[in-house]
């Protein structure tokens, strides 16, 4: 009975040690976060005119479908868009100032909404036999670092059907710049073809 008690006591001591170590690590992470947040709230407004704004290449897209989805998609051409995925609000405030947070969030929201609508519009284009336009729009979205797995799958499907398999390597290269969670899933899809 004594060996079991000794093992149990040792286990409790080790468990207590790791819990305290985890608590102190968590406390340090929280302190760092709050310090960074405190600093970000004091950053003055900075110039955002030179950011990488996203514009839909209207001159390359024939508007033939006259569907609600197409009209909604083209309404984004009148909105300012930025892809800020993977950047926290604290980081945005540190880089561009607290006063720019709302407008930058709006620009990112416009981009996110456009990317969310794009798969439906792509399906309509493909159903109408407009493969070239669908491909061009998907390539445009991916060049803007969209991290939508469905967009990559749609473009991969077009590349397979049109025998453009040499372009898959470029998709893998672009996907290397995406956040890790989506990058891994997208690259798994892409590597299953090669």
Image (cartoon, rainbow, N blue to C red):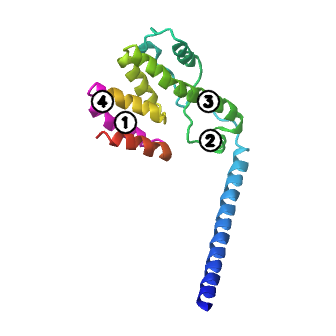
Q: Give how far apart the Cα atoms at labels 2 and 4 are.
A: 41 Å
Q: Name the residue under label 4.
A: 160
Query: Looking at the image, is mark 2 or mark 1 earlier in the sequence?
Result: 2
Q: Is residue 90 left or right of residue 128?
A: right
The kind of secondary structure the magenta stretch mainly shows is helix
Q: Which residue is drawn at 65% across and 78% down?
A: 12
Name the spot of residue 111 as percent of width and height, x first.
Answer: 56, 28
Q: Name the residue under label 1.
A: 171
Q: Is residue 95 left or right of residue 52?
A: right
- Quadrant containing the C terminus is top left
Residue with the most extreme bottom position: 2
Residue with the most extreme front position: 1
Name the spot of residue 113 as percent of width and height, x first.
Answer: 58, 27
Q: Give how far apart the Cα atoms at labels 4 and 3 are.
A: 32 Å
- Tell me the SS state at disc 3: helix
Name the spot of residue 163 as percent of width and height, x first.
Answer: 26, 27
Q: Which residue is drawn at 68% across and 51% down?
A: 36
Query: For residue 109, which numbered disc appears in the image?
Result: 3
Q: Residues within 10 Å of mark 2 (few under 14, many from 20)?
A: some
Q: Is residue 38 left or right of residue 170?
A: right
- Tell me the SS state at disc 2: helix
Q: Residue at x 44, y 21 (%)?
A: 123
Q: Mark 2 points at which residue?
A: 95
Instruction: Say if mark 2 contacts mark 1, CB within 8 Å.
Output: no
Q: In which quarter of the image is residue 1?
A: bottom right
Q: Nearer the viewer, mark 1 or mark 4?
A: 4
Q: Give how far apart the Cα atoms at labels 2 and 3 are.
A: 19 Å
């Amino acid at each position: 009975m004594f060996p079991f008690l000794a093992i149990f006591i040792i286990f409790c001591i080790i468990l207590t040690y790791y819990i305290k170590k985890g608590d102190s690590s968590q406390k340090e992470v929280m302190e760092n976060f709050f310090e960074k947040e405190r600093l970000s709230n004091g950053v003055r407004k900075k110039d955002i005119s030179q950011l990488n704004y996203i514009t839909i290449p209207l001159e390359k897209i024939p508007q033939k479908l006259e569907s609600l989805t197409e009209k909604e998609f083209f309404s984004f051409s009148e909105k300012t868009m930025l892809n800020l995925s993977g950047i926290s609000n604290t980081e945005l405030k540190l880089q561009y100032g607290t006063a720019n947070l709302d407008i930058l969030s709006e620009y990112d929201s416009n981009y996110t909404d456009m990317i969310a609508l794009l798969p439906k519009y792509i399906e309509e284009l493909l159903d109408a036999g407009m493969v070239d336009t669908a491909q061009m729009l998907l390539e445009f979205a991916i060049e803007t670092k969209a991290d939508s797995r469905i967009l990559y799958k749609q473009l991969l499907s077009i590349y397979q059907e049109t025998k453009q398999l040499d372009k898959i390597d470029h998709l893998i290269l672009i996907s290397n710049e995406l956040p890790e969670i989506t990058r891994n899933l997208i690259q798994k899809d892409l590597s299953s073809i090669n």
